[in-house]
Image (tube, rainbow, N blue to C red):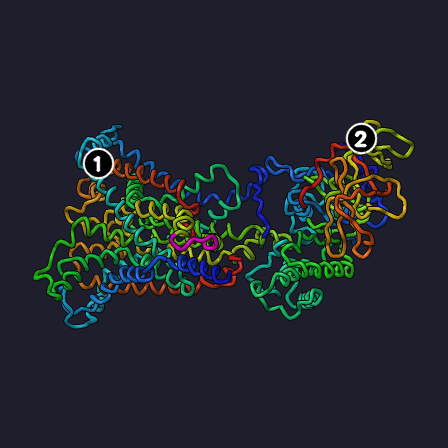
């Protein structure tokens, strides 16, 4: 864990020590050393990071990793055991939820069943003592934004899941909060609707320019929608970065395994060069690039490389080349997943269906290659954090 | 091949057809068993003769006598006093107690809950004795006060457990949403939580009222010369069954059915019920 | 559906303000439930002397219960009767609950309410009803006379153990029905479907799936009915005559003419003890929501 923190300070240019000395936008929300312990369970462990004004920021991780708890701490619905929360530079740690200028869209929407849609959306304005007349315009505007203008008289039980979700969104936006917190809002929707709503949410965020803090366990969702993602595991943040950084430069095997598909191979460092490492995997020797993990000769390591960067029988030459036996070919619609084995390790390659222009036979011995710069290395101890089932 | 499959299909279907026979008839018989005694009482209340055997004339005489029976009418009013008071206290004690159980984490909660159930679960005679001794020790004479307090012993938990059950089903989410949207704890309570548990409170109160209005077992221990309706009726019963008893029974029957009818309408299909059920 | 993680705040994290909620109900609990029961317990160790109650500590009352045949035999008799009542109530109530919860589609609520309704009708009215039916001048005799089966009214129907059992059962049926119905209703339909799919007919499904899953509700209903029957003193007094006396009657008698409050308290406390044991059994083996399942 020490390693992780160090790594974050060095590697992650988005981390900080002084809140407003930041390039690229002002800080909207800052968490400083936030910890939350429930009886004997540590849900959130010493988190420090910031979220910039106007960005779409996701908290991504498997269930139980503490992302919802973190969100609730920002909202004020949980009090941190230790640490501070800053909203727009102000310390709000001891300010209760109803006096913070952030609103939440809950996972089950929490639409008040005893009020109709209009009254639901009016509720936050009512709390600000805005009269019903003055509120009318704002409510209409926000209803139009979510495309539910005709539904103002309906009640919760007369709405479908997707409609309720949009009302929850409208209700949270009508007050024009500093930031909008969303707790897996699309989780209960079916697939097509979810995809459609992702676009709607993203558009609304861009149009209004409000900071979104978005909790999800769906990595595709996070990658599609976010400006930056914090990948969480068991109460700590493994990495914060743009979707591109998270995908192509995962900081830990956990992040590497959680996003997309990833190959993992065990290896041993046999020689150290200036910028590179000579590594033995099975019977083969390959080259890896050095990175922030200072790995040396005789270190046991873990190598990760994306299947789409692994090529079978390539016509061009790449840094690393091994021979492996074709064990499985799976047709997946728009691509093929081709799995090979060597020395009790597996390497999968993913190739777009249209690009498959060779004959492949099972059990055939083939050349499998990848470029050193497309692989990452990690100390072997971090292997246990790899997520097995997503 | 087709035929073979069809064959096994049939056998399976026949086996499956073997259900419990006569279930419906049995059930109807039970319903008849449950309602016949009540119908008998109603019929006898219109019987013309003083002796309760035969059905000579149909008459409303007994109902007339009933309304002229000042003792009975006053005991009815007494019952109303006691029950309304007991229910009022029950609502306050029960609702606050329910919130206490659901929202606050205190040690010994399970014991607390079990002990609170005692007045409802234990035989009434025990509660009656205990309360009697309690009042004697405090040198409180048996009167409306003692009866009312005796009733509060069971009306409070009835309301409390109804509200508790609803609060548990409701979950914290609505309160969180209200707080998140800017409502202080007090506003959350009155604008969101209470409207959503309203029917549980009312349902519990109605149930408690019915239990209190009908209560004889505990009341009999705590009554002096000031009687409630059940005590008066019991007095009537101990000296044989005069037709007036049937008349008052029929009136009570009608009243109960009306109350149940309204309860069913009122708490049956409210929108929040649907919501919470989901 | 999101799985609710129940995470309790530590004791000290909660605002002390919220404990105020518990003040009224705690006062009620102590003053109206605990103190009277404790006082009754204390009373059971005193002794009566003439028309006074002497303030000494003695086990005499409890010893009397065990030494004197009358009392513990009566307890046994009441036990037996309560047991019979509960069994009959279950036999009556179970098929009914099964029918309404698993066979009826429409009108299910209506029929459910129809069972509950007698529960809401006055307890006394129901007793009056049975006295009417079973009495010398009652319905049963009336019918038999008119049908020519008997020449004179029979007095065997009333004022005996049977009439007490019948009336107690009549009272007990709704109390058995409710937890049973709730338990049966809660059995997910897909379990039944799975059993059917695997080749079970209704009887097999019942024996292997439905009945075992309904047991907690059955236990709760049985225990409820048992306690109601065990402690009742009004029904035996009204319909029991001389042979139908139950334990409740002698307890009551101590507070009536006999004016032996200490002894009555002891008897009462013994009943309390028995009831407590029954309740513990119900908690352990019965349905979790107890009698408050809606």
**Label 2 chain ID:** A
Kindly identify the residue that appears in the image at 17 percent across and 62 percent down.
C139
Q: Nearer the viewer, residue A209 or C282?
A: C282
Q: Residues within 10 Å of mark 1 (few under 14, many from 20)?
A: some
Magenta span: C196-203
Indicate whether residue C200 is drawn in magenta.
Answer: yes
- Which residue matches tag 2? A268
Q: Residue at x 59, y 39 (%)?
A: C13
State the residue in front, A245 or B158: A245
Q: How many marks?
A: 2
Q: Residue furthest right?
A: A274
The alpha-carbon separation of the residues under discs 2 and 1 comes to 84 Å
For residue B109, above or below residue A159: above
As for residue A292 lying within the magenta part, the answer is no
> Which residue in the rendered view is the most extreme toward the front?
B1
Mark 1 lies on residue? C72
């Amino acid at each position: 864990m020490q390693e992780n923190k160090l790594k974050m300070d060095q590697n992650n240019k988005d981390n900080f020590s002084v809140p407003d000395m930041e390039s690229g936008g002002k800080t909207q929300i800052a968490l400083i050393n936030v910890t939350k312990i429930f009886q004997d369970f540590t849900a959130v462990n010493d988190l420090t990071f910031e979220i910039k004004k106007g960005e779409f920021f996701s908290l991504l991780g498997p269930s139980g990793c503490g992302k919802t708890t973190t969100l609730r701490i920002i909202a004020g619905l949980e009090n941190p055991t230790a640490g501070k929360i800053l909203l727009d530079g102000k310390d709000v740690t001891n300010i209760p939820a109803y006096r913070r200028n952030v609103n939440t869209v809950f996972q089950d929407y929490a639409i008040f069943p005893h009020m109709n849609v209009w009254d639901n959306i009016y509720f936050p304005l009512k709390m600000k003592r805005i009269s019903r007349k003055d509120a009318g315009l704002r409510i209409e505007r926000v209803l139009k934004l979510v495309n539910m203008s005709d539904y103002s008289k309906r009640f919760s039980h007369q709405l479908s899941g997707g409609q309720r979700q949009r009302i929850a969104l409208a209700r949270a936006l009508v007050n024009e909060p500093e930031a909008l917190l969303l707790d897996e809002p699309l989780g209960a929707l079916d697939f097509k609707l979810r995809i459609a709503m992702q676009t709607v949410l993203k558009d609304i965020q861009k149009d209004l320019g409000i900071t979104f803090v978005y909790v999800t366990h769906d990595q595709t969702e996070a990658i599609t929608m976010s400006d930056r993602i914090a990948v969480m595991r068991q109460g700590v943040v493994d990495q914060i970065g743009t979707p591109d950084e998270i995908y192509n430069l995962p900081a830990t095997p956990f992040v590497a395994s959680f996003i997309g598909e990833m190959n993992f191979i065990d290896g041993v460092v046999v020689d150290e060069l200036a910028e590179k490492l000579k590594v033995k995997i099975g019977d083969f020797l390959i080259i890896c690039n050095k990175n922030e993990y200072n790995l040396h000769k005789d270190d046991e390591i873990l190598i990760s490389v994306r299947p789409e960067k692994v090529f079978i029988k390539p016509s061009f030459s790449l840094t690393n080349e091994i021979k492996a036996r074709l064990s499985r070919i799976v047709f997946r619609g728009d691509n093929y997943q081709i799995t090979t084995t060597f020395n009790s390790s597996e390497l999968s390659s993913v190739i777009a269906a249209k690009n498959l222009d060779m004959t492949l036979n099972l059990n055939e011995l083939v050349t499998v290659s990848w470029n050193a710069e497309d692989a990452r290395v990690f100390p072997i101890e971090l292997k246990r954090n790899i997520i097995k089932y997503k | 091949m087709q035929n073979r499959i069809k064959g096994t299909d049939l056998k399976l279907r026949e086996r499956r057809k073997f259900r419990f026979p006569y279930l419906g008839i049995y059930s109807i018989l039970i319903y008849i068993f449950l309602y016949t005694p009540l119908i008998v009482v109603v019929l006898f209340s219109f019987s013309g003769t003083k002796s309760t055997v035969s059905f000579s004339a149909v008459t409303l005489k007994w109902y007339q006598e009933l309304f002229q029976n000042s003792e009975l009418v006053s005991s009815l009013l007494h019952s109303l006093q006691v029950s309304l008071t007991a229910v009022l206290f029950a609502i306050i004690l029960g609702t606050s107690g329910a919130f206490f159980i659901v929202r606050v984490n205190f040690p010994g909660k399970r014991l607390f809950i079990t002990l609170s159930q005692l007045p409802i679960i234990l035989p009434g005679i025990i509660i009656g004795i205990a309360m009697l001794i309690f009042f004697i020790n405090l040198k409180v004479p048996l009167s409306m006060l003692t009866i009312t307090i005796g009733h509060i012993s069971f009306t409070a938990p009835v309301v409390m457990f109804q509200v508790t059950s609803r609060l548990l089903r409701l979950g914290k989410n609505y309160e969180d949403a209200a707080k998140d949207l800017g409502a202080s704890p007090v506003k959350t309570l009155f604008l969101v939580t209470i409207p959503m548990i309203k029917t549980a409170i009312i349902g519990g109160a109605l149930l408690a009222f019915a239990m209190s209005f009908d209560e004889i077992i505990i009341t009999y221990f705590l009554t002096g010369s000031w009687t409630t309706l059940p005590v008066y009726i019991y007095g009537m019963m101990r000296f044989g069954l005069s037709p007036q008893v049937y008349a008052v029974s029929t009136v009570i029957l009608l009243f109960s059915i009306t109350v149940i009818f309204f309860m069913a309408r009122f708490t049956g299909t409210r929108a929040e019920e649907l919501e919470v059920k989901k | 559906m999101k799985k609710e993680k129940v995470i309790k705040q530590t004791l000290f994290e909660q605002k002390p303000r919220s404990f105020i909620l518990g003040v009224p109900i705690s006062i009620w609990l102590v003053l109206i439930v605990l103190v009277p029961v404790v006082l009754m317990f204390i009373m059971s160790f005193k002794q009566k002397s003439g028309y006074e109650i002497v303030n000494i500590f003695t086990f005499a009352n409890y010893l009397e219960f065990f030494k004197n045949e009358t009392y513990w035999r009566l307890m046994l008799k009441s036990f037996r009767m309560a047991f019979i009542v509960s069994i009959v109530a279950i036999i009556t109530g179970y098929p009914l609950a099964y029918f309404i919860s698993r066979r009826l589609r429409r009108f299910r609520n209506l029929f459910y309410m129809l069972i509950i309704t007698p529960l809401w009708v006055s307890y006394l009215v129901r007793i009056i009803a049975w006295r009417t039916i079973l009495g010398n001048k009652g319905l049963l005799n009336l019918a038999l006379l008119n049908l020519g089966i008997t020449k004179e009214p029979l007095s065997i129907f009333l004022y005996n153990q049977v009439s007490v059992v019948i009336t107690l059962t009549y009272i007990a049926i709704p109390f058995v029905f409710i937890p049973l119905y709730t338990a049966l209703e809660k059995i997910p339909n897909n379990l039944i479907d799975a059993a059917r799919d695997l080749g079970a007919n209704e009887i097999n499904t019942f024996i292997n799936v439905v009945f075992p899953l309904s047991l907690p509700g059955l236990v709760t209903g049985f225990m409820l009915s048992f306690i109601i029957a065990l402690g009742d003193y009004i029904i035996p007094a009204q319909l029991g005559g001389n042979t139908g006396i139950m334990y409740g009657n002698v307890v009551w008698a101590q507070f009536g003419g006999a004016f032996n409050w200490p002894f009555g308290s002891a008897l009462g406390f013994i009943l309390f003890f028995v009831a407590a044991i029954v309740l513990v059994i119900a908690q352990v083996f019965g349905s979790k929501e107890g009698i408050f399942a809606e």
